[in-house]
Image (cartoon, rainbow, N blue to C red):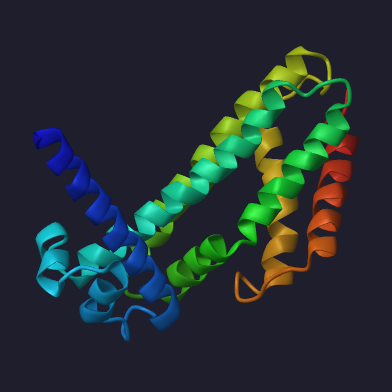
Amino acid sequence: MVETASRARVDKRQAILAAAFDVFARRGYAQACVKEIAEVAGVAKPTVYNHLNDKETLFRQAVDAAADAVLAQNLAVVERLREPGDDPRATLEDVAYRLVRTCDDERSRSLKWLTYAQVARFPDVVDAVHARTGLRLAEALADRLARLVLAGHLRPCEPADAAEHLLALLTGPMEARSGFGMRKVPTAQLRAVAVNAVDVFLRAYGA
């Protein structure tokens, strides 16, 4: 019975955070109100305050939850490099395409827009999101690239540098094409970004 109540509380908190992120993404921080967040979450307004003390805490927790969700998506993609198969280039291109597709989904674009839009009010949120989505992804990618080096698919190198360079080849064009997350990028362009990034990457790091 206690476990069920605890699970229900966790589920309700997650629903509130998801609703908060949705409202903040549509309204911006200043225009968002707790009443609307409660309505979207399907709970009473006091329930929101019972789980999260105030609007600022709600914003920070909602952004953190969204960043964690984006990271989980990207980590699952990078895990595909554990078994690169007989064609590492094709696997890298597939991974690169899936990464930029995640970067272009609505949650990722909203997360980017929110962190940029609120940088003056919450400058530390940018660092928190980057740590969750950028640094941890780079660490995971470096680990997988190190395995490719050991398998002879990449030349001997510093995996952390290689991961940083590959991510830069992906995120740079995506920032420009999406207007820093303000617009969706056509699928054909996503594929082009992925293929071009891997081509340049392998020219530098290919065995």
Q: Is there any visible trace of residue 160 in the rendered image?
A: no
Q: Is residue 177 visible to us here?
A: yes
Q: Is residue 178 above or below residue 148?
A: below
Name of the residue lying farthest toward the front: 1
Q: Quadrant of residue 163?
A: top right
In this view of the protein, which residue sits in the foreground, 195 or 202?
Answer: 195
| 192 lies left or right of 180 | right
For residue 119, what is the image quadrant? bottom left
In which quadrant is the N terminus drawn? top left
Is 39 drawn above or below residue 97 in the view shown? below
Q: In which quadrant of the rendered view does residue 26 lie?
A: bottom left
Residue drawn at (9%, 35%) of the image: 2
Q: How many marks?
A: 0
Q: Residue at x 71, y 59 (%)?
A: 172
Residue 111 as seen in the image, left or right of residue 12: right
Residue in view at x 58 percent, y 43 percent: 74
Q: Quadrant of the C terminus?
A: top right
The image shows residue 19 at horizontal and vertical percentages of: 34, 67
Work out whether residue 184 or residue 175 is closer to the camera in this orientation and state it.
184
Q: Is residue 98 left or right of residue 187?
A: left
Residue 44: horizontal and vertical position, in percent? 15, 71
Residue plotted at (78% across, 41% down): 94
x and y, in percent, of residue 62 in the image: 33, 60
